[in-house]
Image (cartoon, grey):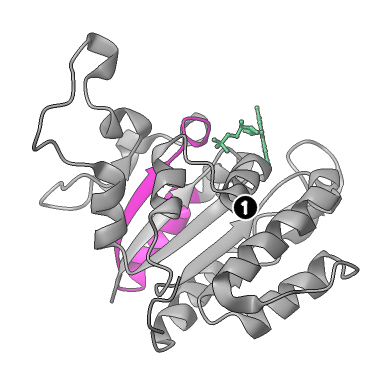
Amino acid sequence: MANVLLGATGSVAAIRVPALYTALVADGHAVKIVATEAAAYFFDPAAIGNEQPARDAVVFLDEDEWSGRKTGRRYEVGDRVVHIDLRTWAEVFVIAPLDANTLAKLAIGLCDNCLTCVWRAWDPARPVVLAPAMNTLMWQNPFTRRHLRAIAADAGAGHIPGHLDESQLIAQINDRSRTLRVIQPIEKRLACGDTGIGGLAEVGEIVTAVREMLARPARPVTF
Ligand SMILES: Cc1cc2nc3c(=O)[nH]c(=O)nc-3n(C[C@H](O)[C@H](O)[C@H](O)COP(=O)(O)O)c2cc1C
């Protein structure tokens, strides 16, 4: 049992977020979700977590980070900083689905929403699971490999040669990094109508990856 933070981004595969949430809870974890604005187009945040008797907040959106901003409220000393609270609470960060836009942001450190602020503030000793999902040509675009290599280098995988294809690259990352697991997208008929690689991995595979990463011993923080 662990505190699992599920990050959801604006892939159509975010329709699976409720199922992934349910599967992680069934696996014994306490689960919170941080979702981008685009992700919330694909599932109803209000419908998640209703089964919990205490009704603690389960889904965090940017409007929770900037409480009352749209109605003119200003920050008051003592207000919670949601991305730091989530980072501190979580023992593992699983971003599923991870879309192309947020993958690029993670690779270069942009932090313009709650999810990417959690990433930027993440304790590098704690594990991360990334499950990309995107159109086949987006996946095969050189940016994908470039961004994954950058993230992997920061997660202790060292330099990975540039000539590897996406599958070989993922195999190298998972072999070399103790804290980062990238889950290979699957081949299927995608929501956009194309058939090819880019579909979100099965829920069960993501849950298993989370369990395996939690079972690894933590390493000391080094910057
Ligand atoms: C219907 C629809 C489906 C989309 N599916 C995907 C997808 O599967 N993968 C992806 O990388 N982007 C997809 N996008 C594009 C992202 O939603 C877009 O890049 C957005 O800016 C991502 O924002 P976020 O990274 O902050 O969540 C889709 C957009 C729409 C409108």
Q: Residue at x 8, y 38 (%)?
A: 78
Q: Amino acid at mark 1?
A: Ala
Tell me the quadrant of the picture where the C terminus can be found.
bottom left
- 148 falls in the magenta region: no
**In the displayed structure, would residue 76 be above or below residue 200?**
above
Ligand 1 image-quadrant field: top right
How many badges with numbers are in the image?
Answer: 1
Q: Is residue 203 visible?
A: no
Residue at label 1? 107
Q: Residue at x 76, y 56 (%)?
A: 146
Tell me the quadrant of the picture where the N terminus can be found.
bottom left
223 to the left or right of 135 = left
Q: Residue at x 48, y 82 (%)?
A: 212
The residues colored magenta run 17-39
Residue 27 picture location, percent across and down? 36, 73
Disc 1, SS: helix
Q: Residue at x 54, y 67 (%)?
A: 206
Residue 138 picture location, percent across and down? 80, 44
Residue extending furthest front? 223
